[in-house]
């Protein structure tokens, strides 16, 4: 019997990605009754993944998850190795030599494709790009969004579409005391947008917002939510969906749409957010830059809860040169790890990584969006990571202990040999403190650094 997990031979785990699922995996390991050392490896100098760069700046409550992550990071068995890209600076193969187990928690980094002509024209952006830009993510710092026109179109009716539309609809006063990146606030303050069209390919009974997020559109200081009453008419299958007891979320959403459709338009407000249904994106037209989007009117077909949108052949066009595709995220592959291309996830059985034929891959585990796809809220990842850790802990006997593993110290020597500037949690805390200090005079919780060099330059 191996003595793995004892103080003489602690379990060494490398976690790749420091978003919620990475931190929850670390938490479950640290709270287990074995001796374990966890190294979380992160591509950016800053941890917390989408809690830092995905959650909308005007939703600060959602960011309080960070308080728990800081407590986890305080544990002596936790270590952050940030500013290191797995697959470039260090390989999965190298990590399999330094650690007993590797947990892949790097999320879903890209977006699903619409697969229509003109999708990549200038002016047609992914929601990820816009969200990353206003949240100060270094990958998206240099993007430019032209808000000098009347109309913006958002494709998709999930919570990310709600975030994007709300940020476009808010005034500077509503955003200036949040942690929105300054460059984004400057551009948004010059916005000339008057109409924001949020397009659903299915009907009002199938929208994927959560009720709270939808309600916020009724509380905007300079924007009216607009829904035409006739757009709320339902087919029999959708009525059945809303009658189903367990479908309380969609019923609440539908009721909120009804409230919006009854409201008088406040003529003192300069913007309008139109929620439009049963319209599928067909083509984006333009030369170098997009000039319009062609939408095809849809009808629903199929059983209740399985209804899909089918084009009717009738089209409408919206003239605009700015569009955001907010149709869900998609994971990307990691060299040396099996991958399911069309799902954008790592094949797995309850978190144990498998080959596409179902065989378990020794040493590799996964959790979060790259395990199960991009769904759920921050807290959903806690149960997801706990399930993975349960599998890992029950596999201890199967892990290779024939060669002594050296964990973080060996990673550091490999990175130092390659002259990779890695960042630890104390160094991140210096960046963090500096951001908070920069935000204070502006009444912001922090002013984020948006270039990696800036972050590294404040470490003493
Ligand atoms: P999502 O909830 O899956 O919504 C995607 C939307 O895009 C749906 O309306 C979907 O319509 C539509 N869509 C997909 N493919 C399409 C296509 N080819 N053409 C037109 N429309 C298409 O994804 P998300 O908004 O990216 O959110 C991801 C997850 O993060 C969700 O679980 C969300 O709740 C969560 N999140 C939560 C918060 C929060 O708690 N405040 C904030 C942001 C995100 P169909 O229904 O027809 O597929």
Image (cartoon, grey):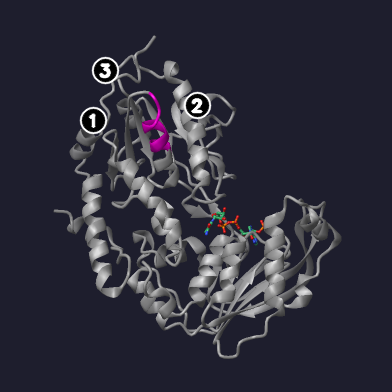
Q: Is residue 412 above or below residue 134?
A: above
Residue 410: which disc?
1
**SS category of the residue bearing label 3:** loop
Which one is closest to the eye, mark 3 or mark 1?
A: 3
Going from N to C along the chain, the mark reached first, 2 or 1, is 2
Farthest residue to the bottom: give it: 267
Residue contact at pointers 3 and 2, CB within 8 angstroms = no
Left or right side of 311 for 347: left
Which one is closest to the eye, mark 2 or mark 1?
A: 2
Residue 8: which disc?
3
Q: Magenta stretch: give its range.
A: 25-33
Q: Is residue 153 visible?
A: no
- What's the CA distance linking mark 3 and mark 2? 23 Å
Q: Is residue 317 above or below residue 42?
A: below
Q: Is residue 349 above or below residue 208?
A: above
Can you identify the residue that label 2 sits on?
A: 391
Going from N to C along the chain, the mark reached first, 3 or 1, is 3
Q: Which residue is drawn at the image coordinates 21% and 49% (left, top)?
A: 427
Q: Nearer the viewer, residue 41 or 57?
A: 57
Residue 377 spot, x, y in % from top left? 53, 51
At label 1, counting other C-alpha atoms closer than 10 Å, the crowd grade (few under 14, some 14-19, many 20 or more) is: some
Q: Which residue is drawn at the image coordinates 39% and 78% (left, top)?
A: 187
Farthest residue to the top: give it: 1
């Amino acid at each position: 019997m191996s003595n793995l997990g004892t103080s003489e031979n602690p379990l060494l785990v490398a976690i790749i990605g420091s978003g919620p699922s990475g931190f929850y995996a670390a938490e479950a390991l640290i709270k287990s009754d074995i001796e374990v050392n966890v190294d979380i490896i992160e591509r950016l100098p800053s941890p917390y993944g989408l809690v830092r760069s995905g959650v909308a700046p005007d939703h600060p409550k959602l960011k309080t998850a960070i308080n728990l992550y800081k407590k986890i990071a305080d544990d002596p068995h936790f270590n952050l190795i940030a500013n290191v890209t797995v697959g470039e600076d260090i390989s999965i193969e190298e990590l399999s030599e330094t650690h007993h187990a590797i947990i892949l928690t790097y999320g879903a980094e890209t977006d699903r494709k619409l697969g229509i002509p003109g999708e990549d024209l200038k002016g047609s952006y992914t929601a990820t790009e816009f969200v990353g830009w206003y949240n100060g993510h270094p990958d998206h710092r240099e993007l430019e969004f032209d808000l000098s026109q009347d109309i913006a179109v958002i494709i998709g009716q999930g919570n990310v579409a709600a975030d994007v539309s709300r940020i476009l609809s808010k005034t500077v006063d509503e955003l200036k005391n949040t942690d929105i990146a300054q460059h984004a606030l400057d551009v948004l303050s010059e916005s000339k947008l008057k109409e924001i069209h949020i397009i659903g390919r299915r009907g009002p009974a199938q929208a994927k917002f959560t009720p709270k997020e939808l309600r916020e559109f009724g509380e905007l200081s300079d924007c009216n939510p607009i829904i035409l009453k006739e757009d709320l008419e339902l087919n029999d299958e959708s009525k059945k969906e809303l009658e189903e007891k367990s479908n309380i979320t969609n019923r609440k959403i539908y009721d909120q749409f009804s409230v919006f459709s009854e409201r008088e338009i406040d003529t003192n407000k300069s913007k309008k957010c139109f929620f439009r249904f049963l319209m599928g994106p067909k083509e984006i037209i333009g030369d170098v830059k997009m000039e319009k989007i062609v939408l095809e009117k849809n009808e629903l077909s199929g059983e209740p809860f399985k209804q899909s949108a089918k084009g009717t052949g009738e089209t409408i066009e919206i003239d605009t040169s700015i569009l955001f595709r907010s149709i869900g995220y998609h994971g990307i592959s990691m060299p040396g790890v099996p991958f399911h291309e069309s799902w954008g996830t790592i094949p797995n059985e309850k978190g144990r990584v498998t080959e596409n034929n179902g065989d378990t891959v020794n040493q590799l585990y996964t959790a979060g969006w790259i395990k199960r796809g991009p769904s759920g809220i921050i807290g959903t990842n806690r149960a997801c990571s706990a399930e993975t850790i349960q599998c890992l802990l029950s596999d201890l006997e199967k892990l290779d202990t024939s060669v002594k593993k050296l964990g973080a110290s060996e990673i550091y020597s490999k990175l130092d040999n390659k002259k990779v500037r890695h960042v630890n949690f104390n160094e991140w805390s210096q960046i963090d403190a500096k951001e908070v200090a920069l935000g204070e005079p502006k009444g912001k919780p922090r002013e984020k650094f948006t270039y990696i060099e800036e972050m590294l330059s404040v470490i003493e």
